[in-house]
Image (cartoon, rainbow, N blue to C red):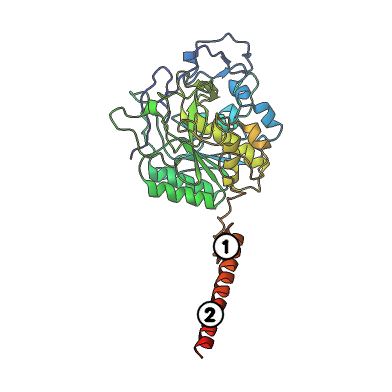
Amino acid sequence: MGLRTVRRAAAALGVAAVLGSGMLAAPGAAVASMPTAAASTSTPSIDAGEQCTPGDRVLVSGTSYLVDRLGLEAAWTLSRGAGVTVAVVDSGVEAGNAHLAGALVPGASTFGDGTAPADDDLFGHGTAIAGLIAARQVEGSGVVGIAPEARIMPVRAFQAAPEDGQSSRDIAGPSAASVTAGIRWAADHGAQIINVSLSDDQSADLYAGAVSYAHARGALVIASAGNRNTANANRPDPEHFYPGELTGALAVSAVLKDGTWDPDSSYSGSHVDIAAPGQSMPSAYISGGDCVFNGDSASSSYATAVISGAAALVAARYPDETPDQWAFRLLQSAMRVSPTEPTDTVGWGEVRPAEALALVDDGTLPGPPSPAHPAGEPEPEVTRTISIEPDADPLDPARAIVGWALGGAATISAIMLLLARGRARSTAT
C-alpha cells in the first residue's frame, strides 16, 4: 500500500525500526537505572547501546537538548499544553510508562477487528511519539515532552513486533484504511491535534477525505514529510507524501541536532511545510523507562511529534483560534534564512514554540499568508470615457496673426478690384 516504512529487525535494541529511522541510542548518552525502593538515580552510566533493551528500565539523565534548542523554558511560561488533546495515530501507547502516567485519555484501535487495546504498544513507535509530545517529568530523568500538560489519545492503527523470531505475536502493519479511520475517530472524539508520524504515496482520496473531515471538526493533522533513509532503495522516490502534503495538514521534515538538513535522512520538495529536530531524541520507551532514539540520523517521525507538541502549546493558549491559525503561528515564527520564501528542505523553517506563542498577527508579517487577514480581492478596473484633446500648438498665435494679415490683404485686394471695375464701367459710360 506504499507506506514508506521499515520493518527491519533491531536485535540489539529488541525493537523493530520505527516508521522513520531505526531506534538507535545516541552515542555517549548517559542513562541511569529506573529509581525504585532499592535503587537510586546515581547508578553508574551504562553503554548507550544497551539503554533500549526490553526489560531494562532505565532513565536518560541530564536535560534534553530540545529544551535549549527550541527555547522551551520561555515557551512554558506562556503555555504547557493544558486542556489540549493530541491523538497519536500509531502503534499504540504503553500506558504503564512513568512519563505518561495520568496523560492518556481513552483511545481506540482501527486495525483488524478493533479489539486490540490502544494503550498497549508492541512496536515502541507510538510510545516514543507520545513521550516527545507530552511526557511528564520523572525524577532522575531528562525526558520531558514539548507540551508536558497536554493529553494523549492513543489511536492504534497498526501493530508491529520485532522480527527474526524475537516475538511470536502477529504483525499487522499500517494501511491507508486503518490510518484514515484513526484520523476520523480522533476528530470525532475531541482531538485538537492529530499526529500521524508516517507518509504514504498512495490512496490520495482516502487521506484527503480524512484530513478534510478532521479540519471541519477543528483538528489540525500533522504528518511526516517522508524519510529517505528508510525508503526502499529499489523503488523510485515517491511523488506524494500523504497526508502531510494535503490542505489542512502540515508536512514535517527533520533536521539534525544542530539544525542541519540531511539529504540522506529526509526527502525535500514543495510539500514540506516546517522542520524540527529528529536526531538523538530522548523519549519514553516500551520498557517503561527511557530511550534516546535515532543517534545517527534524523527521523521525520520524531520531528512530527515535536511539531505536534508545539501545536498543542499554541492550541492551549489560543483555544478560540482555528487549526489554520495554529498552523500559521508555527510557520510564521519558524527560524529561516528568508522571511518571505519557504525552501524545499525545511519549508518555512525550524519550529520555535515561544515565538509562535508570542506572535502578533496584524496581517503585515512577511512569509506565509495569514488566514486571519486574507489578501483582498483585486479591485475591478473602472471603465471611463476619456476625451482626447489635441495638444496646444505653440505657433497658434503666430498663425492667427498671419491669418489676420492674409485675411486683411485679401480683403483690401478685393476692395481694390471692385473699385477698379467701377472705374472701368464709368469710363465706358
Residue furthest toward the bottom? Answer: 429
Crowdedness near tag 2: few (<14), some (14–19) or many (≥20) residues, C-alpha within 10 Å? few
Tell me the CA gap for discs 1 and 2: 31 Å
Residue 195 location, x and y as percent? 51, 38
The amino acid sitting under disc 2 is Ala
> Which residue is disc 2 drawn over?
420
Crowdedness near tag 1: few (<14), some (14–19) or many (≥20) residues, C-alpha within 10 Å? few
- Mark 2 lies on a secondary structure that is helix
Question: Counting residues from the N terminus, which is met first, the one under dot 1 or under dot 2?
Answer: 1
- Mark 1 lies on a secondary structure that is helix
Q: Residue at x 46, y 14 (%)?
A: 49
Between 80 and 45, the one lying in front of the other is 80
Answer yes or no: is residue 304 visible: yes
Q: Residue at x 55, y 60 (%)?
A: 380
Residue 72 location, x and y as percent? 65, 28
Left of 112 or right of it: where is 393? Answer: right
Residue furthest toward the top? Answer: 44
The amino acid sitting under disc 1 is Arg
Q: Quadrant of residue 43?
A: top right
Residue 101 location, x and y as percent? 61, 32
Residue 175 location, x and y as percent? 38, 41
Point out the image quarter for the N terminus: top left
Q: Which mark is residue 399?
A: 1
Q: Nearer the viewer, mark 1 or mark 2?
A: 2
